[in-house]
């Protein structure tokens, strides 16, 4: 994405490793808009003036974009271009002031005004009956739904679970994730701790054990979730999101409003409603202690503690 021959190949490779592929994909789309703007206005792409940057961001605002999109563009330009007038674009005082103006004139809004009751999905899972009698499709949908609810994690986290890193203990199950996740720091691991639950039809640990047993002879990958038909390889995040939407639909929840990611909203909101302390919710869902994301975007009218999961399951 950087200017051709701007850096040696080995340097460029390391620079690309500094962000997730999804981030570069977003930056690529953003930077294309910047280059088109520069072409139309006969401006230099790589050595712009601060006024050019400000006018471009202001145009995005005039075109109807909100704070989140414009802030993403700021991050993109800061990463790709770096400094203007001796200061980094992302922290340039005037750019920061402009973004504050964007936030005041068009404040970022949460995706959902409210969230669905997790009891709807839990009742659907319970009504499916005994795990041993479920086909691979229903069992897959049930497991991903229970994991999403009892951990509050993103689909990215669930898709990263590997069978060798699942450890069953007396009364619980611990899952260690070594993959780099959106919220993880370099070299860190994510640990999901799942408790046994008395209701066997809602116990995520028992559902996980049954799923592993049913897929043992057919799986072609170490990743936990596999396709429901040959060649039984690892499924993508998009597939897991689609499975979650199927569960929502079958639970009577409007999928034209709520996506698979809304499981994160529902579970964290339910835990908060049941009196789980904010620190436990943050720790469960992978937010840092001083994060404002939950209060702003998720609270609506891994895990090294079982408090979070039990609160959701107990309804």
Image (tube, rainbow, N blue to C red):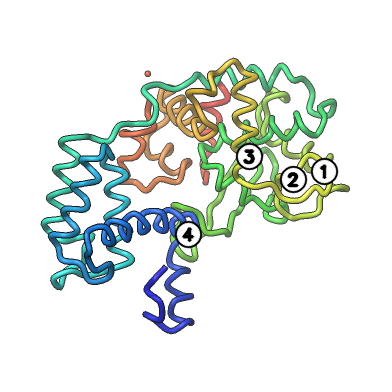
Horizontal and vertical percent position of residue 267: 49, 29
Q: Which of marks 1 and 2 is nearer the N terminus?
A: 1
* 128 lies above or below 219: above
Task: Name the residue: 49% across, 65% down.
Answer: 187
Q: Residue 20 bears which disc, if any?
A: 4
**Helix, strand or loop status at disc 1:** helix
Task: Name the residue: 46% across, 52% down.
Answer: 182
Circles 3 and 2 in contact, beta carbons < 8 Å: no
Depth check, front residue: 89 or 154: 89
Depth check, front residue: 297 or 283: 297
Q: Mark 1 points at which residue?
A: 215
Circles 2 and 4 in contact, beta carbons < 8 Å: no
Question: Which numbered mark, 1 or 3, is in the foreground of this view?
Answer: 3
**CA separation in Å, label 4 and label 1:** 30 Å
Q: In this view, does 282 lie to the left or right of 247?
A: left
Question: Which numbered mark, 4 or 1, is in the foreground of this view?
Answer: 4
Q: Mark 3 points at which residue?
A: 240
Question: Which numbered mark, 1 or 2, is in the foreground of this view?
Answer: 2
Circles 1 and 2 in contact, beta carbons < 8 Å: yes
Q: Which of marks 4 and 1 is nearer the N terminus?
A: 4
Q: Is residue 206 visible to the viewer in this orientation of the structure?
A: no
Which of the 4 image quadrants contains residue 101? top left
Q: Is residue 295 left or right of residue 24?
A: left
Q: How crowded is mark 3: few (under 14 residues within 10 Å), some or many (20 or more)?
A: many
Q: Which of marks 1 and 3 is nearer the N terminus?
A: 1
Q: Is residue 201 visible to the viewer in this orientation of the structure?
A: yes
Q: Residue 226 bears which disc, if any?
A: 2
Task: Name the residue: 32% across, 65% down.
Answer: 79
**CA separation in Å, label 1 and label 3:** 17 Å
Horizontal and vertical percent position of residue 63: 25, 40
């Amino acid at each position: 994405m950087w200017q051709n021959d701007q850096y040696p190949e080995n340097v460029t490779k390391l620079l690309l490793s500094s962000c997730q592929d999804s981030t570069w994909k977003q930056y690529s789309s953003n930077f294309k808009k910047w280059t088109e703007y520069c072409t139309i206005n006969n401006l230099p792409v790589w050595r712009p003036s601060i006024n050019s940057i400000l006018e471009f961001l202001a145009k995005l605002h005039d075109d109807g974009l909100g704070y989140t999109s414009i802030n993403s563009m700021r991050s993109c330009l800061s990463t790709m271009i770096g400094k203007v007038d001796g200061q980094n674009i992302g922290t340039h005082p005037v750019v920061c002031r402009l973004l504050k103006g964007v936030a005041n004139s068009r404040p970022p809004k949460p995706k959902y005004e409210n969230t669905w009751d997790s009891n709807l999905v839990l009742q659907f899972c319970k009504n499916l009956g005994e795990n041993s009698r479920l086909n691979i499709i229903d069992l897959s949908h049930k497991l991903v739904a229970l994991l999403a609810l009892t951990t509050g994690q993103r689909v990215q986290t669930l898709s990263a679970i590997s069978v060798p890193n699942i450890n069953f203990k007396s009364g619980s199950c611990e899952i260690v994730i070594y993959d780099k996740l959106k919220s993880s720091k370099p070299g860190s691991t994510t640990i999901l701790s799942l408790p046994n639950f008395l209701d066997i039809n809602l116990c995520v640990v028992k559902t996980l054990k049954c799923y592993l047993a049913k897929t043992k002879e057919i799986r072609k990958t170490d990743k936990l979730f596999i396709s429901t038909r040959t060649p039984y390889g690892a499924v993508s995040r998009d597939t897991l999101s689609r499975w979650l939407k199927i569960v929502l639909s079958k639970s009577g929840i409007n999928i034209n409003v709520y996506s698979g990611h809304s499981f994160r909203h529902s579970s964290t909101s339910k835990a908060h409603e049941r009196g789980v302390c904010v620190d436990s919710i943050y720790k469960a869902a992978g937010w840092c202690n001083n994060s404002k994301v939950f209060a702003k975007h998720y609270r609506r009218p891994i895990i090294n503690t079982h408090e979070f999961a039990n609160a959701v399951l107990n309804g």
